[in-house]
Image: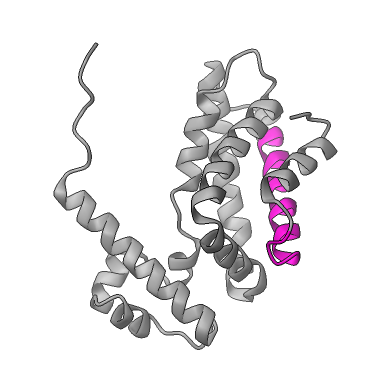
């Protein structure tokens, strides 16, 4: 058995820490002052970085709220699902396990970020572009799992899964986080005919 490879180097760890610090500062300020009233300069100052450092990590103010590491995690989980699962089942189970882990560790941050995206016009308008990229990522993960090219069927199934997830997230935000998000996701997939 081979030894595990080295973890991220010092430079990567410092970049990740700076990125996390900027996002946390942004979320605090935006929740306190509102999205439109919060400037990049204020976020940079609260994170103790220059505004140029902010832009090295996030190309726009919107990106500091939208950007996360969830999509690559979910794509990896999709690609690792057993081959005997139908694509929608694989998507549901990958989303379910990834979301359960994120929800358990970062529930409040996830709720705050999701609420901001759903209630801030500038962020909501960008959601379609982000969802298009996520749908592509999911379809590519399904194709990689099956050893085939991305097809219309895989893209439609990925889009349907993403729609189910989006409605579940919207319902969760509307409930102010009182409903259980993983259960909402299960209910959304049941509406697509997929059982847990």
The quadrant where residue 172 appears: bottom right
Please check the rendered image and state whether residue 171 is part of the magenta-colored stretch, yes or no. yes
Q: How many marks?
A: 0
Q: For the magenta stretch, what is the residue range? A: 156-178
Q: Position of residue 187 (x, y in %)?
A: 79, 42
Q: Is residue 56 above or below residue 182?
A: below
Q: Residue at x 60, y 42 (%)?
A: 135
The quadrant where residue 117 appears: bottom right
> Along the horizontal axis of the image, is 85 left or right of 100?
right
Q: Residue at x 32, y 67 (%)?
A: 21
Name the foreground residue: 65 vs 126: 65
Q: Residue at x 66, y 29 (%)?
A: 154
Q: Position of residue 33 (x, y in %)?
A: 51, 87
Q: Is residue 153 above or below residue 130?
A: above
Q: Is residue 94 above or below residue 14?
A: above
Could you tell me which quadrant the N terminus lies in?
Answer: top left
């Amino acid at each position: 058995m081979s030894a595990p490879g080295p973890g991220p180097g010092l430079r990567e760890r410092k970049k990740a820490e700076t990125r996390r610090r900027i996002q946390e500062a942004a979320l605090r300020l935006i929740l306190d002052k509102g999205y439109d009233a919060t400037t990049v300069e204020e976020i940079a100052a609260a994170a103790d970085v220059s505004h140029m450092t902010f832009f090295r990590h996030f190309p726009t103010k919107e990106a500091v709220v939208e950007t996360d590491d969830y999509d690559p995690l979910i794509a990896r989980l999709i690609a690792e699902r057993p081959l005997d699962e139908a694509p929608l089942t694989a998507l549901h189970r990958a989303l379910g396990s990834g979301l359960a882990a994120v929800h358990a560790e970062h529930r409040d941050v996830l709720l705050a970020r999701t609420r901001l995206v759903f209630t801030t016009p500038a962020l909501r308008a960008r959601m379609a572009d982000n969802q298009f990229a996520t749908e592509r990522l999911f379809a590519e993960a399904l194709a990689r799992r099956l050893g085939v090219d991305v097809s219309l069927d895989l893209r439609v199934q990925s889009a349907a899964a993403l729609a189910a997830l989006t409605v579940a997230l919207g319902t969760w935000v509307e409930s102010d986080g009182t409903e259980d998000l993983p259960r909402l996701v299960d209910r959304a997939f049941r509406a697509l005919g997929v059982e847990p």
